[in-house]
Image (spheres, rainbow, N blue to C red):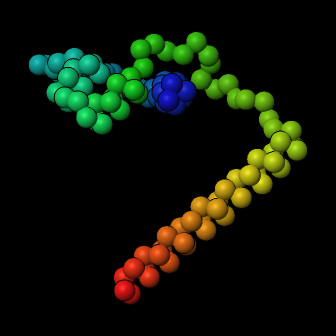
Amino acid sequence: MKHVYDYMFHILQSCGKLMKMNVEVPEGAKEVCPETMACPVKGGRMRQYMDDSLILSPSNKGSCEMPPPFEEDELKKFLEKKKSVEKEVEKWTNEYWEEQKKSLQH
């Protein structure tokens, strides 16, 4: 999640450099921080998600660092595994719907 926020920050910064406008804080505006947004949410999954996705500091890595490219055999293994997993999930889905049809017919 941290890399997603770093990337979003990088994109927003890049876009901001292209904009030519003067930003003014309107009268009566209040500063909002993540904690004040999360405070009204008491417990539950929503609060847990907010706590888990909270970023306390920026990453020390550059936002656009890419991992090294796959070697050809690594990529082939990855794609084969992905395809087999997709087939297995499709098989499970079909089995589930067949069971649902049978249960509705009885």
**Quadrant of residue 91 within the rendered picture:** bottom right
Left or right of 99? Residue 22 is left
Residue 79 locus on image (x, y percent): 76, 52
**In this orientation, does residue 61 appear?**
yes
Q: Name above or below for residue 13 compared with residue 56.
A: below
Q: How many marks?
A: 0
- Residue pictured at 54% horizontal, 72% vertical: 95
Q: In the visual, does 63 lie left or right of 98?
A: right
Q: Quadrant of the C terminus?
A: bottom left
> Toward the viewer: 50 or 30?
50
Depth order, front residue of 39/57: 39
Please provide percent x and percent y for residue 1.
50, 29
Is 76 left or right of 49, judged from the image as shown? right
Up/down of 81 relative to 71, above or below: below
Q: Where residue 101 sits in the image (x, y, percent)?
A: 43, 81
| Outermost bottom residue | 105
Question: In front here: 77 or 38?
Answer: 77
State the residue lying farthest toward the left.
28
